[in-house]
Image: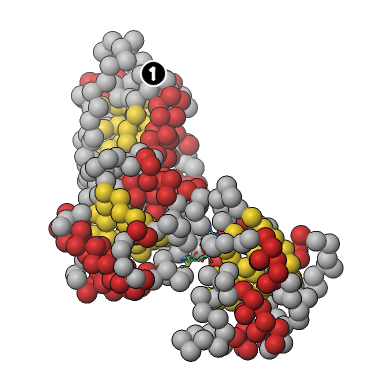
Amino acid sequence: MDPGSGVVYPVGLRLLDRRVVVVGGGQVAHRRVAGLLAARARVTLVSPEVTPALEALVEPGSLTWVRRRYEPGDLDGAWYAVAATDDPAVNAAVAAEAERARIFCARADDRAASSVWTPAVGRHGELVVGVHGGGDPQRAIGVRDAVVAGLTDGSIADRAARTPEAARGGSVVLVGGGPGDPGLITVRGRQAVAQADVVVADHLAPLTLLESLPASVEVIDASKLPRGRSMAQEQINALLVEHALAGKRVVRLKGGDPFVFGRGMEELEACVAAGVPVEVVPGVTSAISVPALAGIPVTHRGLTHEFVVVSGHLPPGHPQSLVDWPAIARLRGTVVVLMGVDTAPAIAAALVEHGRAPDTPVGVVADGSTPTQRVVRTTLAGLPRTVAEAGIRPPAVWVVGAVVALNAPHDAPPQDDADLD
Ligand SMILES: C[S@@+](CC[C@H](N)C(=O)[O-])C[C@H]1O[C@@H](n2cnc3c(N)ncnc32)[C@H](O)[C@@H]1O
């Protein structure tokens, strides 16, 4: 072996049930043992002392601990060895025995004397990333971390990845995209987008994520589908099913969370009815995140013990409304209204009529998480005028309750539930 050579031949050792001997019982040995056990090797540990973490593996029988110093012959029958003591002479003796017996041996203290160089290893599902740094372990670790992070956040597309369902006949993932900022989608959501063959996107979804997709990915703007509202939903359901049955990985990219006024269940039911595998990836709902981005928490210790999220798409008194506005008006906590810009005057009037104080603080947040985000603060009585004067347009969330005033000076909350935070 040329000690100066940086040339390696990378392989993946399949160590299942094969004897591996690790000499040493410290931190380095522990790291190597963890990887070897993950590969389900039959590990024998030779060391007079071991770390508590290693000792904890002995009891359940995960490894065999030979509680003494290394002796020649300890590598008998081994397929692979690790010399990881803090005594170079012992490590040298282990490596020499391994060399004579033609057992590959990783010598943790001396790279040049090691017949094996261990790569920086990262895992992403079934995928294993191993990086050799050409003699620079920190470089290998940096590249390994970057690759795993890229696979995790979807910026490195694992496009050939196929779940068993997808291999059989396509699939649908209902992805909650968050309030619009591409940084507020979940890691799983981002992965699904990166692996999609077809994306059916809503206009409130984080559409900038789609710019980096390859041209081969079909992007369908769901808001541009022709015909009326309910027909459009039927068309979306049909599109999802049709593409999935054609073997495509379909992502339905929605704003916020798919199950908060998002019609996600209708899409899920359509997929299930057609026998299409479907996964739901929850999202960060605008009901909570948009107020939060404006500095409004929907709860606050000692001030608000409840919050309710209401759709304002129908005004109070509308024959199809399912909302009990008088009951909502009696609540003392936070009321969050979605889809309630045009109906704001009628809803505010109903809340006051049924008991909420006219001077209750209200915060209106439009275009939350986007560069055009706007926040205006008013009261229930002042809401209609504020919405009109500020020219508030959808999408907007408005919040009623004492939490809206929290950025103003206020009394310290009473210490009534100190166990919560
Ligand atoms: C059909 S609902 C969908 C809600 C979504 N599923 C969620 O969980 O956020 C659309 C309404 O959500 C609210 N909304 C969604 N994104 C918003 C944003 N970025 N800023 C303000 N409001 C938003 C608005 O009230 C909008 O009319």
Tell me if 365 is positioned left or right of 144 in this view.
right
State the residue at coordinates (34%, 55%): 221
Q: Name the kind of residue labelled 1 in the image.
A: Gly
Within 10 Å of the Cα at label 1, are there few (<14), some (14-19), or many (20+) other Cα atoms? some
Asked if ligand 1 lies within 8 A of label 1, the reply is no
Query: Taking the image as drawn, is residue 317 in sight?
Result: yes
Does residue 70 sit above or below 372 in this rendering? above
Quarter the N terminus occupies = top left
Does residue 232 sit above or below 14 in this rendering? below
**Residue 20 location (% of width, % of height):** 28, 38
Query: Taking the image as drawn, is residue 165 in sight?
Result: no
- The answer to which image quadrant residue 168 occupies is bottom left
**Residue 151 location (% of width, % of height):** 36, 42
Q: How many marks?
A: 1
| 79, 269: nearer the viewer | 269
**Residue 63 location (% of width, % of height):** 34, 47
State the residue at coordinates (32%, 36%): 129
- The answer to which image quadrant residue 347 occupies is bottom right
Tell me if 13 is positioned left or right of 112 in this view.
left
Does residue 69 sit above or below 6 in this rendering? below
State the residue at coordinates (34%, 29%): 131
Does residue 340 sit above or below 143 in this rendering? below
| 128, 251: nearer the viewer | 251
Tell me if 232 is positioned left or right of 343 in this view.
left
| 122, 375: nearer the viewer | 375
State the residue at coordinates (33%, 21%): 114
Quarter the C terminus occupies = bottom right
**Residue 72 location (% of width, % of height):** 30, 27
Q: Which residue is mark 1?
A: 135
